[in-house]
Image (tube, rainbow, N blue to C red):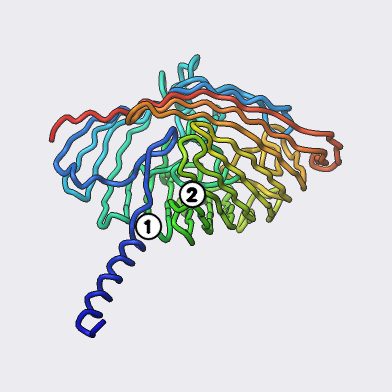
Amino acid sequence: MNEKTKIPVFFFCCILFSQCLFAQTPVRESLFTDVYTIDSEKEGELDLCIDNISFLNNTETGGDIQKGYTLPGFRINPRLTYYPASMIKMEAGVSLLKYWGADKYPNYAYRDIPEWKASGYQLGFHLLPFFRAQIQPVPQLNIVLGHIYGGANHGLIEPLYNPELNLTADPEMGAQIIHNSRVAHFDAWVNWETFTFKNEANNEVVTAGAATCFHITNPQSFFYLGVPIQAVVTHHGGEIDSIDGVASLANGAAGLQFGFNFDNSAFKYLRLSLMGAGYKNFYSEEPLLFKQGWAAYSNLNIRIWNLDLKMNIWRSGNFINLFGNPIFGNVSTSKENWNFPRIVVLNPGIKYEQEFGNGFHLGANFECHFTPEFTMYDGVNPIKTEKYSGWTTGVFLRINPSIVLKK
């Protein structure tokens, strides 16, 4: 090969490499996740999106770690979506949450099932305005202000984010940057949960997080190897008058993820994650049970047809999870000052999800958790507990059609 032909070949190889490096990994809608990319061909289009998920979810427990309860209801988020340019999307609407049998709701930010603390309340629904402004300067990068792509979209492991919050928590509001390419998926966000006015006797509550996975091999290849790193920090505080109980707490996790993708309509993939996790109390004016803690987490996930089979194994010490499922924490949410310094949790489960055309998903799940013998403390005295177990089951229907109003 002569010098004249070497130069074009060199540049051609560089182009191929850059396309491989910066090509997006596929993004699809599921029962709890949304497609966050912007379709450049929709420039000038106005759509009506009616995003609804109806659910009946039941949790049964022994009561020492958390109390059992049932969630019957639906969420609906009707909104108008406008594409003023090929790389810009704007959405405006409302977010409504309804529990069957409830006719009024506490009027403040929801993270789980809220206690009745608020002086004011809303009738009929828990209702919030909804607005999102988004720009996609390049196909791999999205910048979002307003209502961000939160919840399951962050891809946090269950001990850091309880999937049930997709049904109960307020839509996340703040700012977000998402980068999705062949080499990595990166999601960084700020969720402003509570805003404080002057002379108001409550804290600002802000949560910041980052979830990334470095793809050592192509996520679509037969063998996949990746390095996930996740962190969530919540801060209660502020500088305006009447602030009480300042705190800054963090959860984090990192490790390895590997698996196999099968070109088979029945047996689709097998994935295994091995991660270490930690909890840290950076600052708190109010005494907490633990200053810092540790955990080891493994997750096996197998996809067969439309069934997901999972097995989580969790071992932790002095771990307080900020948004995770309470079964993975070392502090009881049902009995004050009760804690268990060391626990092991076995959490097998099965989930069914079927997509019926674009925007229609039916799902069901069943999972149980079992904690072998451990020692619990009621604040002072150790109490021997032989075992702790419980189960959760639910059925879900998501209807998310998008109707073109103007092209």
Q: Vertical placement of 23 versus 302: above or below? A: below
Q: Position of residue 122 (x, y in %)?
A: 42, 24
Number of dots carrying numbers: 2
Badge 2 element: strand
Q: Is residue 274 left or right of residue 120?
A: right
Residue 292 percent coordinates (x, y): 68, 56
Q: Position of residue 305 (x, y in %)?
A: 50, 32
**How far apart, in angstroms, are the residues tagged by discs 2 and 1?**
25 Å
- Quadrant position of the C terminus in the picture: top left
In the image, residue 220 above or below residue 97: below
Please determine whether, in this image, residue 245 is positioned above or below residue 353.
below
Q: Report if the CB atoms under discs 2 and 1 are less than 8 Å apart.
A: no
| Dot 2 crowding, Cα within 10 Å, few <14, some 14–19, many 20+ | many
Residue at the spot 57% in from the left edge and 46% down from the top edge:
160
Query: Which label's residue is closer to the chain start, 2 or 1?
Result: 1
Nearer to the camera, 174 or 176: 176
Say above or below: 10 vs 353. Answer: below
Residue for point 56% across, 28% down = 365
* Residue 301 image-quadrant placement: top right
Q: Please give the label number shown on residue 207.
A: 2
Q: Quadrant of the N terminus?
A: bottom left
The one nearer the camera, 336 or 131, is: 131
Q: Determine whether, in the image, residue 276 is placed left or right of residue 178.
A: right
* The label number, if any, that marks residue 51 in the structure image: none
Q: Which residue is mark 1?
A: 181
Please state which amino acid type lies under the numbered disc 1.
Answer: Ser
Q: Residue at x 40, y 29 (%)?
A: 355
